[in-house]
Image (cartoon, rainbow, N blue to C red):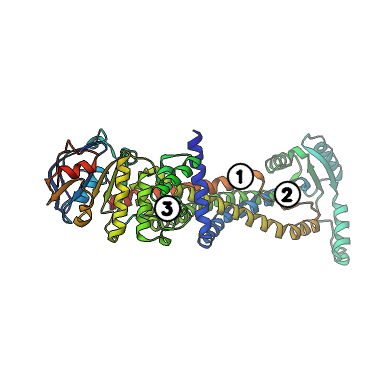
């Protein structure tokens, strides 16, 4: 067991040494793999950050309830009390038609034009803020439905509707990323497989000699498998570095934008979980690519030299 | 040690390299396989090292019937046979040390032990101190000696060499042949294929002469001379 481990470690280090001898070619291969891995990783960063940013905003949204025209102020007050008693409501404010008109006059600057109106065209309105627990998209919708069913209510406007939409878009984006990641993973397997295949062709002589002095197929294949693992690992580390660089570059401007919107949002980097997935993914893809290529190419070589 | 029983070898292109060949080489014996090029010398050695398999007949090496050795066991079998090639087959981008160490690395020997045995093998062929050179820094004769060191480093019971002196001048050839003799003296069964008649005159040991894939002389172990070249010389002038 110990000798076995030593042998594997030796091959592992040996294959790294061989890769570092051709540092330029190795570097290029790792950059290509790194870019392929960095693309889905960066997209994932984008989506998770977007979700983070919008998640906090759900809270500040409220529901506007407009009452039917002709509803008396008395009725509106009663309705307000009724809504206030609901368990899923944190706060209700009544904006009476008169109040609304006053504000409109003041804010719009068309004070004179409003004198021409014979009667107030605005309805009474309630602004309802849900409890924190109710602030999820589904909860908001349920609350809106509840309010809509109340008497004298004409329309209920859910301000959070666009958050709902954004979340749907992000869900779709996440699937897109999964798809892109799958395709790019295939690309990584292809890149590594082809690199290993060329490597094997270049070292045909060594492989033949090794077999002549008693090297088994597994022994001959092992350094190539480790080579693939190194390519994958190197690419993953490069991709991780790219993501970190993107986050570092964008963190400050985004924090400033968030500040302008009165939000304390900070751009998050890849967490340790995502980092681990990236590294393990890179290594596995490297191993897979080299395994397929090495097994296939070595079998072809053996066939060519008519091994018995 | 090596036993051929009515062996024929026909290649896929239809050429028959060996025809109904029977042969016995005892343990600890040294023998030359002679004959013109194309007589079947290389094929004979390839069958012993399981580089090729016979079309008919049986080959038994070191107690193992090679017919029964599956493809997956070929590498393990080959570790019992040290091989020396005419073109040495050294790895040009590896040091002499790494080249000689290769069979030990394959066998999974620990690195300390590898260092000891590689130096011992290089010492035997007179190349101690050149471990860190690459093959191209050495002369052809030295390269061939590295090839021999690699063949014997794992102490195989059998050593086979295919035209080991083919690219060497007479002096170097003699030197290489003396090396084989020395390994034979410590009990290794040695089989050397060579067409160099003049060289072989210096070494009066058993000869197996091949002609067109058949043994024409020296098929059986000579009971008197086994493993003792000097007595063989006396027996067959």
Q: CA distance from mark 2 to mark 3?
A: 92 Å
Q: Residues within 10 Å of mark 1 (few under 14, many from 20)?
A: some
Q: Are marks 1 and 3 in contact (CB under 8 Å)?
A: no
Q: Nearer the viewer, residue B38 or B170?
A: B170
Image check: B192 left or right of B102?
left
Task: Please state the horizontal and vertical placement of residue A194, each as a whole percent of the image.
Answer: 43, 56
* Total marks placed: 3
The residue mark sitting in front, 2 or 3, is: 3
The residue mark sitting in front, 1 or 3, is: 3
> Which residue is label 1 attached to?
A276
> Which residue is label 2 attached to?
A157
Q: Residues within 10 Å of mark 2 (few under 14, many from 20)?
A: some
Q: Chain of mark 2?
A: A
> Which residue is label 3 attached to?
B127
Under circle 1, the secondary element is helix
Under circle 2, the secondary element is strand
Q: CA distance from mark 1 to mark 2?
A: 44 Å
Q: Are marks 1 and 2 in contact (CB under 8 Å)?
A: no
Q: Nearer the viewer, residue B165 or A27?
A: B165
* Same-chain status of marks 1 and 3: no
Under circle 3, the secondary element is loop
Task: Please state the horizontal and vertical placement of residue B175, each as a whole percent of the image.
Answer: 32, 54
Can you tell which mark lies on residue B36?
Answer: none
Task: Mark yes or no: residue A191 visible.
Answer: yes
* Same-chain status of marks 2 and 3: no
């Amino acid at each position: 067991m110990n000798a076995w481990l030593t042998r594997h470690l030796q091959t592992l280090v040996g294959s790294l040494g061989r890769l570092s001898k051709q540092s330029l070619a190795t570097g290029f291969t790792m950059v290509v793999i790194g870019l392929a891995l960095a693309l889905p990783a960066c997209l994932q960063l984008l989506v998770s950050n977007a979700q983070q940013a919008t998640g906090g905003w759900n809270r500040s949204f409220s529901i506007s309830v407009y009452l039917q025209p002709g509803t008396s102020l008395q009725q509106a007050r009663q309705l307000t009390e009724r809504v206030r008693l609901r368990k899923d409501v944190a706060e209700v404010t009544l904006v009476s038609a008169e109040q609304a008109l006053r504000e409109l006059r003041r804010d719009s600057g068309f004070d004179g034009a409003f004198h021409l109106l014979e009667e107030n065209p605005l309805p009474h309105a309630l602004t309802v803020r849900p409890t924190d627990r109710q602030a999820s998209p589904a909860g908001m919708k349920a609350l809106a439905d509840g309010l809509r069913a109340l008497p004298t209510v004409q329309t209920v406007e859910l301000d959070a509707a666009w958050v709902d939409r954004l979340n749907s878009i992000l869900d779709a984006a996440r699937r897109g990323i999964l798809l892109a990641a799958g395709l790019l993973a295939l690309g990584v397997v292809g890149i590594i497989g082809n690199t290993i295949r060329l490597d094997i062709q270049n070292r045909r002589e060594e492989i033949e000699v090794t077999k002549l002095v008693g090297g088994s197929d597994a022994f001959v294949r092992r350094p190539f498998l480790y080579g693939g693992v190194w390519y994958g690992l190197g690419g993953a580390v490069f991709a991780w570095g790219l993501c970190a660089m993107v986050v570092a570059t964008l963190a400050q401007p985004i924090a400033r934008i968030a500040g302008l919107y009165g939000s304390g949002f900070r751009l998050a980097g890849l967490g340790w979980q995502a980092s681990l997935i990236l590294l393990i993914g890179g290594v596995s893809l490297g191993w897979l690519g080299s395994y397929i290529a090495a097994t296939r190419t070595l079998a072809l070589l053996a066939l060519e030299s008519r091994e018995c | 040690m090596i036993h051929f029983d009515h062996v024929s070898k026909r290649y896929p292109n239809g050429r028959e390299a060996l025809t109904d060949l029977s042969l016995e080489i005892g343990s600890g014996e040294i023998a030359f396989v002679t004959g013109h090029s194309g007589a079947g010398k290389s094929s004979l050695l390839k069958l012993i090292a399981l580089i090729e398999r016979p079309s008919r007949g049986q080959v038994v090496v070191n107690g193992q019937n090679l017919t029964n050795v599956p493809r997956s066991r070929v590498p393990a079998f080959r570790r019992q046979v040290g091989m020396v090639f005419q073109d040495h087959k050294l790895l040009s981008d590896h040091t002499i040390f790494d080249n000689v160490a290769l069979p030990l690395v394959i066998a999974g020997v620990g690195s300390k032990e590898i260092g000891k045995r590689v130096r011992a093998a290089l010492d035997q062929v007179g190349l101690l101190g050149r471990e860190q050179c690459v093959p191209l820094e050495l002369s052809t004769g030295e390269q061939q000696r590295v090839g021999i060191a690699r063949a014997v480093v794992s102490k195989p019971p059998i050593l086979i060499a295919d035209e080991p002196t083919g690219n060497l001048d007479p002096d170097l050839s003699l030197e290489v042949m003396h090396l084989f003799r020395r390994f034979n003296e410590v009990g290794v069964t040695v089989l050397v294929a060579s067409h160099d008649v003049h060289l072989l005159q210096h070494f009066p040991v058993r000869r197996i002469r091949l002609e067109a894939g058949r043994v024409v002389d020296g098929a059986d172990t000579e009971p008197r001379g086994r493993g003792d070249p000097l007595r063989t010389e006396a027996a067959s002038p």
